[in-house]
C-alpha cells in the first residue's frame, strides 16, 4: 500500500487509506444527547419533597449555627461568623400571618430589630460583633424568649 491520500483502500473502498471515524453520526448524536437527557431527567424527575430529607431548610443566615433557644410557639436560631452574628425567629408551626419579632443587640450598640406579621419566620438580622457579647430576643404570637449577654 502507498501513502498516497488519493489511493483507494481495498478493504472498504474509500479514498484516503485512513481509518473510519468511530461510530459515525449516531455516536456523535449520542454524545450530545446523553448529557442533555441526563440534565433534563434531574429537572423533571421528583426529588425529595417536603418532609423528605432533613427537617431544616437551608439557613438564611451565614455562618455556623451557634445556639438555638426554643419556646412554646417557636425558636430563635443564632449563627456566627468571625465578625458577625445573625439571628432568625422561626415559628414552630407555619401558618397564617401572626406577630413575630427578632432582635439582636451587640454590647455597646443599638439593637437590630425585625418585627411584623409573618407566616414562618422573622428575620434575619445581622450585627457586627467582633469581640463583643450580644443579646437576643425573639417572639412568635406574643410568646418568646430573651437571653442575657451571650457569645462573649
Image: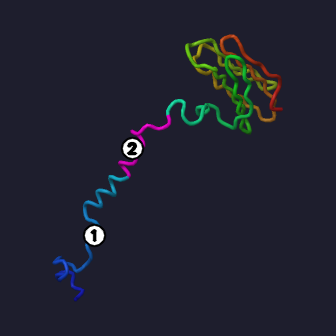
Residue 142 percent across, percent down from the top left: 69, 10
2 and 1 marks in contact (CB < 8 Å): no
**In this rendering, would 12 be left or right of 102?**
left
* In the image, residue 30 above or below residue 14: above
- Crowd band around label 1 with a 10 angstrom C-alpha radius: few (<14), some (14–19), many (20+): few
Q: Picture quarter containing residue 88? A: top right
Counting from the top left corner in percent of width and height, residue 29 is at 28, 56
Q: Which residues are magenta?
A: 35-48
Q: Which residue is mark 2?
A: 41
Label 2 crowding class (10 Å Cα cut-off): few <14, some 14-19, many 20+? few
As rendered, which of 43 and 113 lies closer to the eye? 43
Q: Earlier in the sequence, mark 2 or mark 1?
A: 1
x and y, in percent, of residue 57 in the image: 58, 32
The quadrant where residue 80 appears: top right
Residue at point 56%, 36% (across, down) = 53
Residue 118: image location, x then y, percent = 58, 16
Q: Would you say the magenta stretch is mainly helix, strand or loop?
A: helix
Residue 6 within the magenta-colored segment of the rendering? no
Report the residue at 81% width, 24% height from top: 108
Secondary structure found at label 1: loop
Q: Quadrant of residue 87?
A: top right
**Mark 2 to mark 1: distance in Å?**
30 Å
Q: Which of the numbered marks, if any, corresponds to residue 21?
A: 1
Amino acid at each position: 500500500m502507498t501513502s498516497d491520500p488519493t489511493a483507494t483502500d481495498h478493504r472498504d473502498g474509500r479514498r484516503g487509506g485512513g481509518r473510519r471515524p468511530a461510530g459515525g453520526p449516531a455516536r456523535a448524536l449520542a454524545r450530545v444527547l446523553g448529557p442533555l437527557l441526563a440534565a433534563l431527567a434531574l429537572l423533571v424527575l421528583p426529588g425529595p419533597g417536603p418532609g423528605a430529607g432533613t427537617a431544616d431548610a437551608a439557613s438564611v443566615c451565614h455562618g455556623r449555627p451557634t445556639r438555638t433557644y426554643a419556646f412554646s410557639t417557636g425558636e430563635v436560631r443564632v449563627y456566627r461568623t468571625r465578625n458577625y452574628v445573625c439571628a432568625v425567629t422561626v415559628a414552630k408551626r407555619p401558618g397564617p400571618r401572626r406577630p413575630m419579632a427578632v432582635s439582636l443587640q451587640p454590647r455597646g450598640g443599638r439593637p437590630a430589630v425585625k418585627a411584623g406579621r409573618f407566616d414562618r419566620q422573622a428575620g434575619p438580622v445581622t450585627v457586627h460583633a467582633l469581640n463583643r457579647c450580644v443579646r437576643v430576643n425573639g417572639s412568635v404570637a406574643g410568646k418568646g424568649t430573651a437571653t442575657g449577654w451571650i457569645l462573649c
